[in-house]
């Protein structure tokens, strides 16, 4: 049985093989959860799924309001600029898949097959040696992206796959353990992985996200300091929804 408790390590941290690709649901997720790893492995690529601008520019969601924005258009322009600067600070290249964040649409679930297809095609072009994906904690967008990545894993067997604990959602009691149990039921084994990180580089990168920091509470920011990774092995193809797999046309 996998454990979501904190681990102590006797061995030295390791750097995953490059080229490295990190899958990020939203524009801040890779930095909040993985900036230390990215800073320790410059030249990596961050693939962000939800980068499209809202079709209704004057829409104002609760999250955008909490982050100090007057509307969705201003929020996305600012976040895109912050993301470019944050990735530059850790020496990473950003690529977006141009899907709508679920806060801007009521039909986000319908995009799941196309997300899987586009993500697979992009990873095929990037040809990474290592992919780091969200475990998929709590937020529907994170779960959707994680499930897409799980299907892609089986089509890229020569790649080393790791999962990262999604900040800030990992602070919620039991969510990590529940997700690890779901992965185990799908045939995926999650083993704690001790990856090298650059803490100073992470602090600099997080500081770039002024708008997001306004919306996050202090507990979430403390959690963002530490990064937790899991090595993912085993096959999920037979256990993840067969219909979604066929629709994705991998």
Image (cartoon, rainbow, N blue to C red):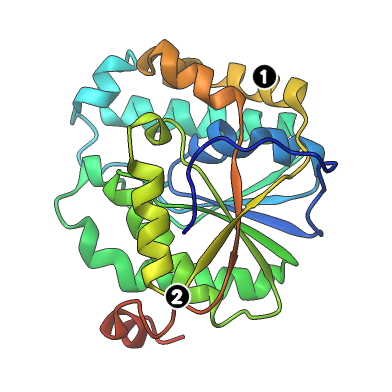
**Mark 2 or 1, nearer chain start:** 2
Q: Residues within 10 Å of mark 2 (few under 14, many from 20)?
A: some
The answer to whether residue 24 is left or right of residue 102 is right
Q: In the image, residue 65 lies at what x, y percent?
A: 25, 18
- State the separation of the CA atoms marked 2 and 1: 36 Å
**Residue 211 visible in the picture:** no
**For discs 2 and 1, the disc positioned in front in the rendered view:** 2
Residue 187 — which label?
Answer: 2
Does dot 1 land on a helix, a strand or a loop? helix
Residue shown at 53% from the left, 67% from the top: 189
**Residue 146 visible in the picture:** yes
Q: Residues within 10 Å of mark 1 (few under 14, many from 20)?
A: some
Does dot 2 land on a helix, a strand or a loop? loop
Residue 176 — which label?
Answer: none
The residue that mark 1 highlights is 203
The answer to whether residue 238 is left or right of residue 229 is left
- Frontmost residue, 135 versus 233: 233
- Frontmost residue, 66 versus 157: 157
Residue shown at 42% from the left, 71% from the top: 116
Vertical position of residue 139 compared to residue 226: above or below:
below
Residue shown at 39% from the left, 29% from the top: 171
Q: In the image, residue 83 lies at what x, y percent?
A: 56, 33
């Amino acid at each position: 049985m996998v454990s979501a408790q904190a681990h102590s390590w006797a061995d030295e941290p390791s750097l995953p093989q490059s080229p490295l690709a990190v899958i990020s649901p939203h524009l801040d997720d890779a930095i909040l959860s993985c900036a230390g790893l990215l800073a320790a492995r410059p030249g990596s690529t961050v693939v962000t799924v939800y980068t499209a601008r809202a079709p209704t520019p004057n829409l104002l969601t609760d999250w955008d309001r909490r982050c100090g924005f007057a509307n969705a258009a201003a929020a996305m322009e600012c976040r895109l600029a912050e993301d470019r600067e944050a990735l530059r600070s850790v020496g990473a290249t950003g690529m977006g898949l141009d899907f709508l964040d679920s806060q801007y649409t009521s039909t986000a679930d319908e995009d799941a097959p196309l997300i899987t297809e586009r993500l697979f095609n992009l990873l095929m072009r990037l040809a990474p040696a290592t992919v780091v994906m969200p475990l998929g904690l709590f937020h529907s967008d994170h779960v959707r992206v994680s499930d897409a990545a799980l299907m892609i894993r089986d089509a890229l067997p020569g790649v080393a796959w790791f999962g990262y604990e999604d900040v800030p959602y990992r602070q919620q009691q039991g969510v990590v353990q529940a997700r690890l149990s779901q992965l185990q039921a799908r045939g995926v084994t999650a083993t704690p992985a001790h990856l090298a990180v650059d803490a100073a580089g992470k602090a600099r990168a997080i500081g770039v996200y002024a708008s997001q920091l306004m919306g996050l509470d202090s507990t979430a920011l403390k959690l963002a300091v530490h990064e937790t990774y899991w090595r993912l092995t085993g096959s999920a193809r037979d256990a993840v929804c067969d219909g979604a797999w066929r629709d994705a046309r991998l």
